[in-house]
Structure formats: structure tokens, C-alpha cells
Image: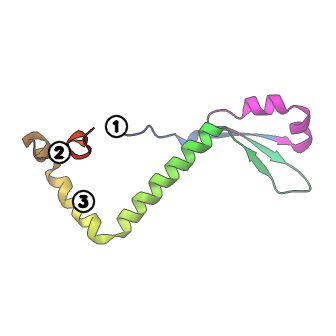
Amino acid sequence: MAAARTDFTRITAKKVSATDLRDSLKDCLKAARANRVVLVQNRRQPAKYLVDKEFLDTLMKERESILATLKILADREMTDRLLKLSKTIDEDVAAGRLLTTADVFGE
């Protein structure tokens, strides 16, 4: 089963100053939920984002998935092999020529 993808095009940001962050930390933490981030601006330091842990974890998993896909696509031989296999996959499944995860790993 494929993992659900996060719609990163729907990210919203709330801008606060570092002073506002200090004065209303609880509200800023509440604002940093799901696809909402808080941009903390400070005159003395580069701006920082405050993000929800689950959102960042999802973002990192998406990044790893994209990098793995790019690695496969960069290997022309493997890409060609996968494309050839994709042409017969439906027939192979219907004919029972493929092993299940339980068959392979004994689960």
C-alpha cells in the first residue's frame, strides 16, 4: 500500500517577530500545525521556520523517496529493466507468476 503524499502546494506561513515568538510561544506553537509553518524573523539573525514535527517527518520521507526514485532513474540499465517489467506486470499478477511478500520473506 502506497503512503499518502502530503500536498506541499498547500503550505501556509504565519510571520512573527522573535519578540512575538517569545511573548506568545504557546500561540505560535499552536499555529505550527499540519501544513502551516511559522516564519520567525529577527533583525540580528537569519529567519527561521517553526514547523510541526509530523510535517517535517513527512517532508523528510518524501525527500528520501524522491532521492531513491532519482537514483533508480539515473541508472539507465535498471530503468530500462523496470520499464520492460511494467509492460507485463498485470499479466504476471493475473497468471500468479509473482511471489507475495510472505512467499519471499516468510511473513
Q: Residue at x 58, y 39 (%)?
A: 10
In the rendered image, residue 20, in percent from the top left (x then y), is placed at 89, 37
The front one of 30 and 11 is: 30
The kind of secondary structure element at disc 3 is helix
The magenta-colored residue range is: 16-37
Q: CA distance from mark 2 to mark 1?
A: 16 Å
Q: Quadrant of the N terminus?
A: top left
In the rendered image, residue 12, in percent from the top left (x then y), is placed at 66, 39
Side of 81 relative to 21 (left or right): left
> Label 2 belongs to which residue?
99
Reading the chain from its start, which is encountered first: label 3 or label 2?
A: 3
The kind of secondary structure element at disc 1 is loop
Q: Quadrant of the C terminus?
A: top left
Q: In the image, what residue type sits under mark 2?
A: Leu
Q: CA distance from mark 3 to mark 2?
A: 17 Å
The front one of 58 and 83 is: 58
Give the foreground label among 2 and 1: 2
Give the foreground label among 3 and 2: 2
Answer with the quarter of the image where residue 50 lies: top right
